[in-house]
Image (spheres, rainbow, N blue to C red):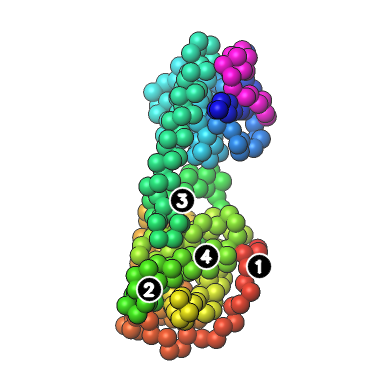
């Protein structure tokens, strides 16, 4: 069975002869204006006519996003050391002369490197108990978004939910039942969010929720309260009710930090500091002293959050 050909997108102006050279090597080549969607392409090629154009590429705000899944190559003159370092730091796979005779081979190798990187990233960054990305993947995704936010500021919120209830279920029903409960909690959180929001496992009893696109910072508090309400609804494992409770830590970009690790540490610390509350436990401040006993279900609140879907917070 013949492998599918690689797809190369020439984004913006293109050096003469590049498209025909790639097509002769079996690539599917698409030419598009700057700003066009790059989804579905294996490689994205950008052409810099001169040194000034190279320097503009080095501060291009969407370059990290382009390089997240596709192999990005820059064609043009030799870059000075600082410009080259800046482009590579933003995810560019290689800088090549446009007339490079081995260009198709270099593009093919870059695509294969990107595919292996993506496979390794997925294998390394998946929480096996839930199928969610875990902390490393969350931090990587946040770093990509923060690079864009530096050039196009917009509110971003990271929530961390510390869940109580897994240990009690493991003790009562067994470890596999506790894993089933973790998966049910993950699904409950995922269905309470928009498609563009990210849910990740950041510990055996904690989940991170990245709200990357908000109209206002206050939306983060509203989503935190909504997620807590969704977790008040009954969860059943092996025919047994398995109540859980959550405390929520909240970190705002740029108010609470401008890098992924700082924001995550703040949200984790806040989630741990407030203890679990039935209805309004998200952490903008420490609301009470010693935490209640784990899995203490007193005061869990009524179930007024049924039917909340991902679309009702827009």
Instruction: Decide which of tag 3 and tag 4 comes sooner along the chain.
Output: 3
- Does 55 sit left or right of 206 as displayed? right
Judging depth in this view, the residue of 162 and 33 nearest the camera is 162
Q: Which residue is mark 1?
A: 312
**Label 1, label 2: how many angstroms apart (C-alpha)?**
29 Å
Cβ atoms at labels 1 and 2 below 8 Å apart: no
**Label 1, label 3: how many angstroms apart (C-alpha)?**
24 Å
Q: Is residue 66 visible?
A: yes
Pair 2/3: label in front: 2
Q: Image point 32% across, 77% down: which residue?
A: 171
Q: Which residue is mark 2?
A: 166
Judging depth in this view, the residue of 307 and 93 nearest the camera is 307
**Label 3, label 4: how many angstroms apart (C-alpha)?**
21 Å
Label 4, residues with CA under 10 Å away: few <14, some 14-19, many ≥20: some
The disc at residue 142 is 3
The disc at residue 187 is 4
Q: Is residue 52 visible?
A: no
Instruction: Decide which of tag 2 and tag 3 comes sooner along the chain.
Output: 3
Q: Image point 44% across, 54% down: which residue?
A: 133
Pair 4/1: label in front: 4
Pair 1/2: label in front: 2
Judging depth in this view, the residue of 162 and 145 nearest the camera is 162
Instruction: Decide which of tag 1 and tag 3 comes sooner along the chain.
Output: 3
Pair 1/3: label in front: 1
Label 1, residues with CA under 10 Å away: few <14, some 14-19, many ≥20: few
């Amino acid at each position: 069975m013949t492998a599918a050909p690689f797809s190369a997108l020439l984004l913006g102006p293109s050096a003469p002869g590049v498209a025909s050279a790639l097509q002769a090597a079996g690539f599917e080549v698409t030419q598009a204006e700057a700003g066009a969607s790059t989804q579905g392409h294996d490689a994205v090629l950008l052409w810099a006519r001169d040194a000034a154009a190279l320097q503009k590429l080095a501060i291009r705000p969407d370059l990290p996003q382009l390089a997240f899944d596709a192999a990005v190559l820059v064609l043009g003159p030799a870059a000075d050391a600082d410009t080259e370092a800046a482009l590579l730091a933003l995810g560019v796979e290689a800088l090549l002369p446009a007339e490079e005779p081995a260009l198709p081979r270099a593009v093919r190798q870059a695509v294969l490197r990107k595919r292996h990187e993506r496979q390794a990233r997925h294998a390394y960054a998946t929480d096996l108990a839930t199928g969610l990305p875990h902390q490393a993947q969350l931090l990587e995704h946040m770093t990509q978004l923060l690079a864009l936010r530096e050039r196009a500021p917009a509110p971003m919120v990271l929530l961390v939910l510390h869940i109580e209830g897994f240990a009690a279920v493991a003790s009562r029903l067994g470890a596999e039942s506790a894993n089933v409960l973790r998966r049910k909690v993950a699904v409950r959180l995922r269905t309470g969010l928009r498609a563009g929001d990210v849910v990740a496992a950041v510990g055996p009893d904690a989940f991170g929720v990245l709200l990357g696109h908000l109209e206002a910072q206050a939306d983060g508090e509203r989503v935190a309260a909504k997620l807590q309400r969704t977790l008040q609804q009954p969860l059943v494992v092996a025919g047994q009710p398995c109540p859980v409770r959550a405390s929520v830590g909240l970190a705002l970009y740029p108010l609470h930090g401008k890098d992924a690790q700082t924001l995550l540490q703040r949200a984790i610390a806040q989630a741990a500091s407030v203890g679990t509350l039935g209805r309004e436990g998200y952490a903008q401040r420490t609301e009470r002293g010693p935490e209640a006993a784990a899995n203490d279900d007193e005061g869990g609140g009524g179930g007024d959050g049924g039917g909340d879907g991902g679309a009702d917070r827009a």
